[in-house]
Amino acid sequence: MERGKDVAKLVYTHVQGGQFRWVTVSTLMLALGTILHLVSPSVAGVTPNWTTATYCVAIHLTRPTYRQSVGIGLVAALINVMTSKSAFPYGNLFSEPAGALTCAILVSLLGRMGSFKLGKLELLPFITGFLSTVASGGVFVTILYWVLGLPTAVYVNAMWPMVLMVSLCNGIVTPLLYVPAKHLFARRGYVTDKMGTTDSHEGLIITPAHDAKISIEHFNYYYTKATTPAIKNINLQVNEGDFLVVTGPAGCGKSTLCMAMTGAVPKFYGGRMEGMVFVNGKATTQVEIPDLATEIGVVMADYDTQLVTMTVGEEVAFAMENRGYSPEQIKERSAAVFKQVGLEGMEERKITSLSGGQRQRLAIASVLATDPSILVLDEPTSSLDPEGTAELYKLVGTLNREHGITVVVIDHDLHAVLPYANRLVLMVDGEIRSDADVPTTLRYMYEHDIYVDALPSIFVTYLRLEAAGYTFPAPWLSVAAAKKGLTSVVH
Ligand SMILES: Nc1ncnc2c1ncn2[C@@H]1O[C@H](COP(=O)(O)OP(=O)(O)OP(=O)(O)O)[C@@H](O)[C@H]1O
């Protein structure tokens, strides 16, 4: 274990696609393999085993675990069984997992021994393409020999030579597929140009400098392939009980900051991160995204995409089932959460029959189900009408004040949310320009002419009257505050 790592010097690079990268890449490669398998002609009865060649490429590029590799092999086997014209294709169910496992073992063992190169040519895809096909073909013909009771002479003199010929073909086609696939996926950010450059913070002890619910320290972030950072040197602490609003012009980095709080930046989006984001004292690079979700619940602007079941009750239960709650716990917690968000009695309703505002509440209920202490809402009102917006923020304000949930809201539309906020952060071009109480940041925006369109008109009126020489006991963030202020002047 390394101790005392300076957070300002931490760097973490990650490839895009996170923990599901191997699924994406192997699915695309197997789809290509299936097409090639269906269209490629055979020369003198010999054709490459395209399925094996394509999953070898996927395993090379993403380096899945042995178990994941066997899974890739099983998917390949099912494709082969379904597309095969052979009388007994079921041997594939054993042969393809064996081929995929052989490839994974070779990539892992030989990869550790360094790069095998002949000039610029990488030899590893040739070796794995050949030997994985020997393994998979060998298992396949051996099963065929046993099941069909074929003569040993046929097995030795016809089947094995055929396996070796196909393996040789695969030794040639695997590198031919590997090179363009590597460049293509690297261009999309799914694999790094140099395999093995993904950093790991495993084993490091990384501690926050601040005792906050969320502590963002010396944080810079570059999206994959970006040359300029989307987030620049951010230091921000969200304290327990805060209702923090983050605002700023389009493209200033608000959503990126929000995703960094959930660990999705950089663990899902990939890219390069400097510094650290801590949630409840844990470095986000050292916690898996689903584990972080029990501490920090996130509702996105397109909240409908977060709803995956048919009924309201199932939606909230689903979140808890995934976290291993017992049926009794699910019942008890569901009732509490529906009460919190004001959806009691709607458990049996179809989600499609709910209004936009109700679906938004349901999305909040399902993230609250696992009892996170922090709630992050990224532009939650973008598809709500003014009434729905007001109701939503009333609910979030109650969750904050009465249930002690720390809240971070990202929004353009400030007038509805600010009456509940205790802090307002202004971001411009990836940087924080103001982090203060609400009136101070609003005044900063007005005086520096930054994003003034978002200023609540009541506050602008207050500032104009103040500039004209009137003084009021408190700034105006609501009509009620303005009435109070005006009354104090008149009387
Ligand atoms: N997946 C991505 N890949 C590459 N660049 C991205 C990606 N998402 C955002 N960016 C870039 O990062 C910068 C910050 O974007 P972000 O979405 O965080 O801003 P925002 O303030 O939330 O914008 P908006 O208010 O329009 O939602 C922008 O320049 C954007 O183009």
Image (cartoon, rainbow, N blue to C red):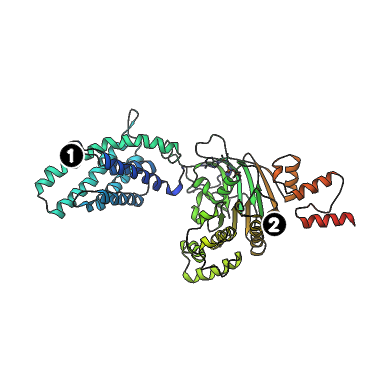
Q: Residues within 10 Å of mark 1 (few under 14, many from 20)?
A: few
Q: Residues within 10 Å of mark 2 (few under 14, many from 20)?
A: some
The location of residue 356, given as percent across then percent down, is: 58, 57
Label 1 or label 2, whichever comes before in sequence order:
1
Q: Which residue lies furthest to the right in this view?
A: 491
Q: On the picture, is 246 further left or further right than 276?
A: right
The location of residue 240, given as percent across then percent down, is: 64, 57
Task: Name the amino acid, label 1.
Answer: Gly
Question: On the rendering, which quadrant does ligand 1 occupy?
Answer: top right
Asked if one can make out residue 321 in the rendered structure from this viewpoint, the answer is yes
Report helix, strand or loop for mark 1. loop
**Which residue is labeled 2 in the image?**
420
Quarter of the image for residue 179 reads top left
For the residues marked 1 and 2, what is the alpha-carbon distance in whole angstroms?
74 Å
Which numbered disc covers residue 45?
1
Q: Which residue lies furthest to the front in this view?
A: 353
Residue drawn at x 34%, y 44% as measured from the top left: 31
The location of residue 194, given as percent across then percent down, is: 42, 36
Q: On the picture, is 490 further left or further right than 372?
A: right
Which residue is nearer to you in this view: 119 or 157? 157
The location of residue 107, given as percent across then percent down, is: 33, 42
